[in-house]
Amino acid sequence: KGDSGLSEVTLLKKQVSVLQGQLTALQASLSKYQKVAAFPSGRIVGNKAFVTSGYEGNFDDLKQRCLQAGGQLASPRNAAENAAIQQIVILHNKPVFLGINDIQTEGRFTYLNGDAIVYSNWQQGEPNNDKGRENCVEIFVNGKWNDRSCGEKRLILCEF
Ligand code: 293
Ligand code: CA
């Protein structure tokens, strides 16, 4: 192959340099929007952002609103995510509904996609399916979970 001045390597070096600049700009932009998402009561954990609008409603209403916004109800998959959700519950002093339920099969708690949960933080004595009517899950100020009737109204908390 001939080499007439601008070698392939030279072209590639230029392209890498352009990409480096774009990556730096993207990192700065991401850093800014992480601050936006966290203010005043959102939380970022790894790749996940937990955000509330302050709205309160029943489980189906909240689930629909998170989906409409392009997210889903907060679904903690580990202690760090649960702690972040707990901080938001503390700030608002209101429990929230998680994206976890046993609507399909009593006693088998799943995420909204139907997968069995991989992490739980039940309050002592829960889940108790009180009066046989509790298929949804709320998280208290103490970070612990309680199964609760899906018809109750709770603070919305979505994850994105
Ligand atoms: C029963 C017994 C209580 C418990 C409550 C919740 C309702 O009333 O100790 O706190 O159920 O599990 O979701
Ligand atoms: Ca209960």
Image (cartoon, helix red, strand yellow):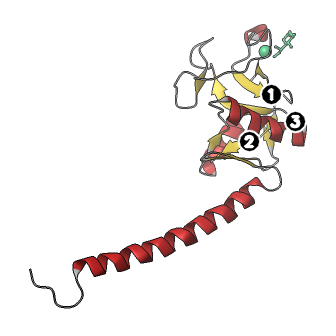
Horizontal placement of 35 versus 28: left or right?
right
Quadrant in the rendering for residue 131: top right
Quadrant in the rendering for residue 81: top right
Residue type indicated by callout 1 = Gly
> Is there CB contact under 8 Å for labels 1 and 3?
no
Image vertical order of residue 117 relative to residue 20, above or below: above
Mark 3, residues whose alpha carbon is within 10 Å: few (<14), some, or many (≥20)?
some
Q: Which mark is residue 157?
A: 2
Per the image, the residue denoted by label 1 is: 143
Residue type indicated by callout 3 = Lys
The percent position of residue 147, horizontal first and vertical second, equals: 74, 19
Mark 1, residues whose alpha carbon is within 10 Å: few (<14), some, or many (≥20)?
many
Mark 2, residues whose alpha carbon is within 10 Å: few (<14), some, or many (≥20)?
many
**Nearest the camera: 63 or 48?**
48
Instruction: Say whether disc 2 or disc 3 marks the residue closer to the N-terminus.
Output: 3
Horizontal placement of 120 versus 145: left or right?
left
Q: Residue at x 63, y 23 (%)?
A: 119
Q: Residue at x 74, y 17 (%)?
A: 122
Q: Quadrant of the N terminus?
A: bottom left
Residue type indicated by callout 2 = Leu
The percent position of residue 34, horizontal first and vertical second, equals: 68, 58
Q: Residue at x 74, y 61 (%)?
A: 36
Q: Which residue is situated farthest in the bottom direction here?
A: 5
Say what secondary structure mark 2 lies in.
loop
Per the image, the residue denoted by label 3 is: 94
Q: Quadrant of ligand 1?
A: top right
